[in-house]
Image (tube, grey):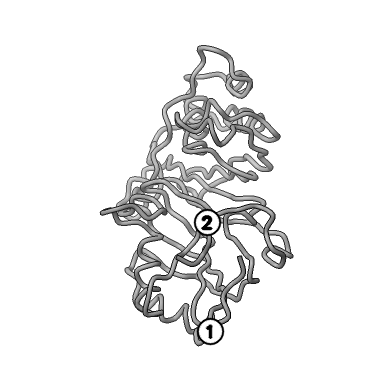
C-alpha cells in the first residue's frame, strides 16, 4: 500500500541500548524500542503513527543498524523529523539518520540481508562497568583456531533448526549465511561477525554459545557439522547472553519500495 496523499514515508536508522527494553516490538505494559519511537512520533504528528522495523530484536539485545519506517505528514522533512525525534527520545534510543523512502518501502520484507556482531570479552578490561553491559565478559582464554574452524562451517544454506528457540517451526528453518567469522575487538576480546538473508529466534546467541564451548575445549569443531545436519540427540550449548549482541546493518536492493509489493504484510499506517 502506498502512502496517502497527505503523508510521505521516511526511513530511519536507529541505535538503541537494549538493556532496559523488552526487545524491539511493542508489547502491552512493557518498554520497547518500537514503543518509544511510536510514542514520540505520536506527539510530533498529533496522532497514532505506526513504526515498522526490519525485524525484532530480543530483550537486552542492542542495535546500531536497525532500519525502520513511518508515514508522517508532508510538513516533516527527514532532517527536521530526525532532530525533533532525538530531542524527545530517551537517552537509550537515537535516530542516526533519516531519509525519504519510496512509497512502497517495507523495512522487513524488502531486506535481503541482516548483519549482527557479538562481542566476547576475554581481557580483564571487559569486566569494566563501561564494557561489561555491552559484551559477554567471559574473561577466559579460548582456542581461536578451533572457533574459526567451526565458524567456517556455518557459511552457506543450512537448516538452523538446532539453533532456534522452540516454537519457530512455522517460519521454516533454512537460512543462507554469507559471513561467519571472528575478528579482534579492541584488544579486549573477540567479535563474531555474521550475516544472513534471515535469522531464527535466538539463532546468533545459540551459535555463539556453541562456538565459545568449542573454544573452551568442551566441544569439537566438527560438532557444528553434526548440529547443522540435525543429528538426533545432539544439542547446542546454552545461548550466549543477550548483552553482547548488536544488530549492525540491514541491506536492501537499490529499487526497494519502488513497486507495489506482491506479498501482504503489516502496513505502516494504523
Alpha carbons under labels 2 and 1: distance apart? 22 Å
Q: Nearer the viewer, residue 46 or 193?
A: 46
Q: Is residue 82 above or below residue 19?
A: below
Query: Measured from the top left, where is residue 214 in percent x and y?
Result: 52, 25
Task: Give the total number of marks visible in the rendering.
Answer: 2
Identify the image quadrant of the N terminus.
bottom right
Query: Measured from the top left, where is residue 64 in percent x and y?
Result: 49, 59
Left or right of 218: which side holds 255? right
Identify the image quadrant of the C terminus.
bottom left
The kind of secondary structure element at disc 2 is loop
The kind of secondary structure element at disc 1 is loop
Q: Residue furthest left?
A: 29
Question: Would you name the residue on which mark 2 appears?
Answer: 266
Circle nearer the N terminus (2, 1): 1
Q: Residue at x 59, y 50 (%)?
A: 115
Q: Is residue 81 above or below residue 181?
A: below
Query: Measured from the top left, where is residue 184 in percent x and y?
Result: 55, 46
Density class for disc 1 (Cα within 10 Å; few <14, some 14-19, many ≥20) is: few
Residue 189's label in the rendered image is none
Q: Residue at x 67, y 52 (%)?
A: 112
Query: Measured from the top left, where is residue 171 in percent x and y?
Result: 56, 36
Density class for disc 2 (Cα within 10 Å; few <14, some 14-19, many ≥20) is: few
Q: Residue furthest top?
A: 233
Q: Nearer the viewer, residue 29 or 227?
A: 29
Q: Residue at x 48, y 38 (%)?
A: 201
Question: Would you name the residue on which mark 1 appears?
Answer: 74
Disc 2 and disc 1 in contact, CB within 8 angstroms: no
Q: Is residue 253 above or below residue 234?
A: below
Q: Residue at x 36, y 43 (%)?
A: 124
Q: Is residue 157 above or below residue 250?
A: above
Q: Nearer the viewer, residue 238 or 202?
A: 202
Amino acid at each position: 500500500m502506498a502512502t496517502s496523499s497527505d503523508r510521505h514515508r521516511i526511513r530511519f536508522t536507529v541505535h538503541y541500548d537494549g538493556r532496559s527494553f523488552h526487545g524491539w516490538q511493542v508489547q502491552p505494559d512493557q518498554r520497547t524500542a518500537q514503543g518509544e519511537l511510536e510514542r514520540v512520533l505520536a506527539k510530533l504528528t498529533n496522532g497514532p503513527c505506526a513504526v515498522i522495523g526490519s525485524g525484532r530484536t530480543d530483550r537486552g539485545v542492542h542495535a546500531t543498524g536497525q532500519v525502520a519506517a513511518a508515514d508522517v505528514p508532508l510538513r516533516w522533512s527527514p532532517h527536521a523529523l530526525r532532530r525533533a525525534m532525538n530531542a524527545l527520545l530517551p537517552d537509550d534510543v537515537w535516530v542516526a539518520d533519516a531519509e525519504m523512502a519510496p512509497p512502497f518501502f517495507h523495512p522487513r520484507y524488502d531486506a535481503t540481508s541482516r548483519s549482527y556482531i557479538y562481542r566476547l570479552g576475554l581481557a580483564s578490561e571487559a569486566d569494566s562497568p563501561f564494557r561489561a553491559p555491552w559484551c559477554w565478559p567471559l574473561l577466559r582464554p579460548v582456542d581461536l583456531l578451533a572457533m574459526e574452524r567451526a565458524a567456517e562451517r556455518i557459511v552457506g544454506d543450512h537448516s538452523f533448526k538446532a539453533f532456534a528457540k522452540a516454537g519457530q517451526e512455522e517460519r521454516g528453518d533454512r537460512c543462507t549465511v554469507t559471513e561467519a567469522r571472528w575478528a579482534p575487538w579492541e584488544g579486549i576480546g573477540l567479535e563474531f561477525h555474521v550475516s544472513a538473508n534471515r535469522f531464527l529466534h535466538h539463532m546468533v546467541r545459540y551459535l555463539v554459545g556453541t562456538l565459545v564451548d568449542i573454544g573452551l575445549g568442551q566441544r569439537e569443531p566438527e560438532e557444528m557439522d553434526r548440529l547443522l545436519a540435525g543429528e538426533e540427540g545432539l544439542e547446542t550449548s546454552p545461548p550466549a547472553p543477550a548483552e553482547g549482541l548488536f544488530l549492525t546493518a540491514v541491506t536492501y536492493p537499490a529499487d526497494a519500495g519502488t513497486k507495489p509489493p506482491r506479498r501482504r504484510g503489516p502496513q505502516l499506517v494504523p
